[in-house]
Amino acid sequence: MKKSIRAIVVLIFVVVIALTIRKLNEPKVFSVDGGYRTVMGTFAHVVAVSEDHGIAARSVEAAFDALIFIDEMMSDYKADSELSRLNRDGFPGPVEVSPELFDVLLASVEYSRMSKGAFDITIGPVVDLWKQAERTGRKPTQQQIAAAKSKVGYEKLILKLDGQTRTVRFAVSGMRLDLGAIAKGYAIDLAVSAARKTGASGAIVDVGGDVSCFGITPRSEKHWRVGLQDPADESKTILVLKLAGKAVATSGDYRRFVEIESQRYSHIVDPATSSSAREFTSVSIIAPTAIEADALATCVSVMGLDGGMRLVESLKDVEVLVIPTDRSKDYIYTEGIKKYVDTSQTYAEDSAASRMIAPETPTNE
Ligand code: AMP
Ligand code: MG
């Protein structure tokens, strides 16, 4: 009897020592939280993880530098940005541009083709009309819309790569490129890659709710948890996603809209009608990169349910969650999104977790 008690005590002792040694051997990681800083007209938040505190701190700064670099280049609010210069001189052009801006323009044209014109960065002149309408409180007239429309169309954007020289030209006068639907995603990807190159073992970059992450978390976990806000109530989280090496972006009219004659107009414009996209409140896309997530969230917002779901279903590793404007309707999502939902969290009754329904299989036209 005494012998067996002694044996158990020895066993426990051995197990405790073994666990302690394992714990001591585990690499200790440091995380540096760069806090919230204003970039691209919104807040940006970066956290980086490394076994070396200095590397984590430098990774955070490298990520912020990348965000600022793209903001300075692609902002249409900054008169001296490369995009503003292109918008001024693109017609008759040509204007030589940086590899980064050229990459974003090429990708934009790709999304225009993919979405059959629903996504279009040449939408600038129409967006300007709606901004003006917000100031005056009056909707644009049919003549104004027609005039702006003649300056819109991605086929009027002429991109040329000649050796190492990249040039851009506008086919008609008065065109204006608006990268509001894609530059943020591109900047996030560049920031994540900057943190990785600086040596971080993991990092998360959040710009205005669009997020990308890689590697380990501050607690050495493999998945980063990203909450999706309730469009109707920002203080509520409707879902928590578990992401590893993925990005999520949300487009919607819940934060940015124009109110004219007591009607809400989204800041996202359907190039086919030159009016705002109104079918959804919020579209969240999970994709391997932030540029894909950002561009596709805007595509789906314009394309509507059938076209948008069909597009997403045709793409590899891309998932969508749609919250319809009409809140009596259920959320709609692709089946694959379930593997990203953190089921260890509890939700309120009226949450996405309890309301998610399977999408109808999209029909092929
Ligand atoms: P996002 O929040 O990513 O959906 O981007 C919305 C922004 O993209 C708007 O504020 C406009 O600046 C711009 N935009 C509006 N409509 C479109 C469109 N159909 N295609 C591309 N960009 C658009
Ligand atoms: Mg977008």
Image: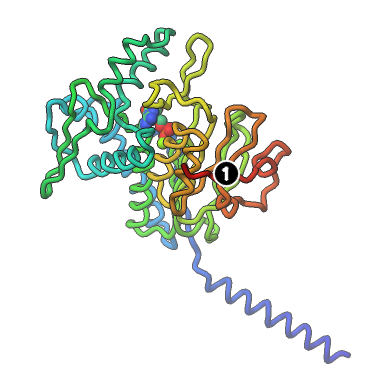
Query: In the rendered structure, which amino acid carries the disc numbered 1?
Result: Tyr
**Rendered view: 97 above or below 258:** below
For label 1, being within 8 Å of ligand 2 is answered no
Task: Look at the numbered disc 1 and give the secondary structure of its residue.
Answer: strand
Name the side, left or right, on which 332 lies relative to 153: right
On the question of residue 154 being in view, the answer is yes
Which of the pair 251/33 is nearer the observer?
A: 251
Q: Residue furthest front?
A: 365
Which of the pair 284/59 is nearer the observer?
A: 284
Residue 9 x %, y %: 77, 83
Number of marks: 1
Q: Residue furthest right?
A: 1
Picture quarter with ligand 1: top left
Residue 181 x %, y %: 38, 34
Residue 230 falls in image quadrant: top right
Per the image, the residue denoted by label 1 is 333
User: What crowding class fits label 1: few (fewer than 14 Cα within 10 Å), some (14-19), or many (20 or more)?
Assistant: many
Residue 2 x %, y %: 86, 90
Q: Residue at x 19, y 30 (%)?
A: 86
Q: Residue at x 64, y 40 (%)?
A: 352
The figure's colour scheme reads: rainbow
On the question of residue 204 being in view, the answer is no
**Rendered view: 20 above or below 157:** below
Which of the pair 135/58 is nearer the observer?
A: 135
Residue 95 falls in image quadrant: top left
Name the side, left or right, on which 14 lies relative to 47: right
Q: Tell me the quadrant of the picture where the N terminus can be found.
A: bottom right
Residue 338 x %, y %: 60, 51
Name the side, left or right, on which 62 lies relative to 29: left
